[in-house]
Image: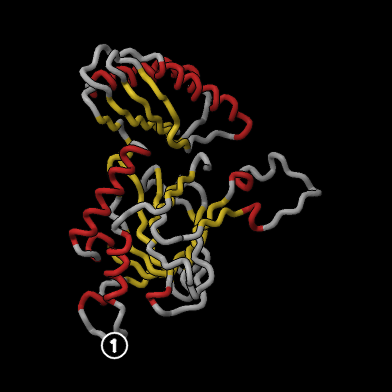
Amino acid sequence: MSRAVVIVDRFAKEAEALRATFDERFAEPRSTRADRFVWDWWHVPGQYTALRTPAWTYFPRRVYEAFHRRLVAWGRETLGCHDISPPWLSLYVDGCRQEFHGDLPHGPFAFVYSLTRWRGRVFSGGETLLLRDEVLDFWEDFRSVRGVEEPDILRAIEPRFDRLTVFDPRIPHGVRQVTGTRDPREGRLVIHGWFVQPRPFVRGPVRVQALSARIDELGGLLGNMLADLPIAGVLALAFTIDRRGGVRDLRVLSDTTRVPKAQDRDRVRVIRAMRAAIAAWKLGPQRAPSQVTLPIVFER
């Protein structure tokens, strides 16, 4: 798994119900029912072409809210982000695409959840495209004798049915042009948006105030190390606070921190020091263990 890309297959049990709503509305091409007239033809010349509609108003309330709660809960536990932006439902048929762009400052993580019937598809294209790190630092280790082709430059992620793809939205990304169908039921269909509001997520009795005090101390401890390091991104950590108040099972969930390549060793050193400091925390006796997801945001 990349430091900045997370892929979860078979994400939501609501997938079939969400997809069934879409298919039912387009089942009869001659229908003039009102819920077919909700799509915006989003066309920005040279940049974006797709059909889109707000996802939270398109689907039946019960099934959408169940999916929404699942996505928000996953974001809290895995990324330390407490909510999502109002998501879009987007449809790509023949000629639809997104050229490369970066999404700032919508949120620290972008997501694409696919309702596309990828197996048995009749169209070409539709993959989410991400520029690889090697391209973003292309000249750092350039060799004039080395050939470069598309897979060396782009990462293409297939929008398989019920797949959640989460990535650092600062990475230049796009959608490969869809060709081969004008039937809405045969196109690329995705729900997408951003995870937002990064802050500690706690499951258990530990006091947030005590945790906040330790986080403040951490900032002071690492202040000198960070002073000359142009680091930006989000480091999401998870750990358990045991009954004695100690930290156990500390691990990295995701890491989008970036620095110029020449300073990456310093970035790694800072993160190691941060993990060591957190592992040494003592928060006092607890009546029960707590699970913590801690997003640490670096800005410059």
Q: From where the camera sits, is residue 299 visible?
A: no
- Point out the residue furthest to the bottom here: 30
Residue in the image at 64% along x and 55% along y:
151
Which residue is pictured at 37% across the width and 26% down the height? 239
Residue 227 rendering spot, x and y as whole percentages: 48, 22
> Residue tagged by mark 1?
30
Q: Quadrant of the C terminus?
A: top left
Q: Is residue 252 left or right of residue 41?
A: right
Q: Residue at x 49, y 58 (%)?
A: 128
Furthest-left residue in this view = 62
Q: Is residue 61 left or right of residue 50?
A: left
* Coordinates of residue 249 in the picture (x, y in percent): 40, 24
Residue 50, how many percent across, how many down?
41, 69
Q: Quadrant of residue 55?
A: bottom left
**Colouring scheme, one of rainbow, by chain, secondary structure, one colour:** secondary structure
Q: Quadrant of residue 133?
A: top right
Q: Amino acid at mark 1?
A: Arg
Whether residue 171 is visible: yes
